[in-house]
Image: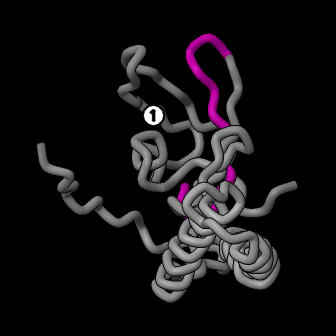
Amino acid sequence: MSRYKPPRRRGSTYITPEGEQRLRQELHQLWKVERPQVTSAVHEAAKNGDRSENGDYIYGKRRLREIDSRVRFLNKRLDELKVIDQTPTDTSKIYFGAWVSLEDEEGGEQRWRIVGPDEFDLAQGRLSMDSPMARSLLGKSLDDEIRVQSPAGLKVYYVTDIRYRDD
């Protein structure tokens, strides 16, 4: 069995200013804070002699590879991202960066912000623009009906509010 994995489709290259700041903070944390600490720990562990059975050395080297891999990814990704910091001219429609309030058929309320794939977090209400839900929302207006196919079946939502500033 082969280990080959076909290349993943790259996500959209849009990001909010807050998302870019979070990625830059993560890069700084990894490169300037965590990596020097792990390097020092690996250096100290290497002084203890036999490295083949030295857990601190083995796990430290593994953590260094993880950090270096993530730093490479963040550097490449930050170079290709486009920061969208302007509100669209037509604020009556849903575009990237919008805060959208939805109501389902049972009267339940949901609030989402449409963001780039590098910053989505469903627990905080940030929905990736590449997700089926966000794709069905983009371009819609107030009181429009949205139909989304989910694993639980077809869901119907109604747009109740569109904002471009979080109040």
* Residue 62 sits in quarter: bottom right
Q: Quadrant of the N terminus?
A: top left
Instruction: Determine the residue located farthest toward the top in the rendered image.
Output: 106
The reply, left or right, for residue 166 in relation to residue 142 is right
Q: Residue at x 42, y 14 (%)?
A: 152
Q: Secondary structure at mark 1?
A: strand
Instruction: Determine the residue located farthest toward the right in the rendered image.
Output: 167
The reply, left or right, for residue 135 in relation to residue 75 is left
Instruction: Determine the residue located farthest toward the left in the rendered image.
Output: 1
Closer to the camera in the image, 17 or 156:
17
Closer to the camera in the image, 95 or 113:
113
Q: Main secondary structure of the magenta part?
A: loop
* Residue 47 sits in quarter: bottom right
Closer to the camera in the image, 88 or 61:
61
Which amino acid lies under the numbered mark 1 shown in the image of this protein? Ile
Q: Which residues are magenta?
A: 93-107
**Colouring used for the render:** one colour
Residue 125, image x, y percentages? 69, 43
Q: Is residue 125 magenta?
A: no
Q: Residue at x 54, y 84 (%)?
A: 75
Q: How many marks?
A: 1
Whether residue 25 is visible, yes or no, is no
Q: Quadrant of the C terminus?
A: bottom right
Whether residue 74 is visible, yes or no, is yes
State the residue position of label 1: 146
* Residue 29 sits in quarter: bottom right
Q: Is residue 106 magenta?
A: yes
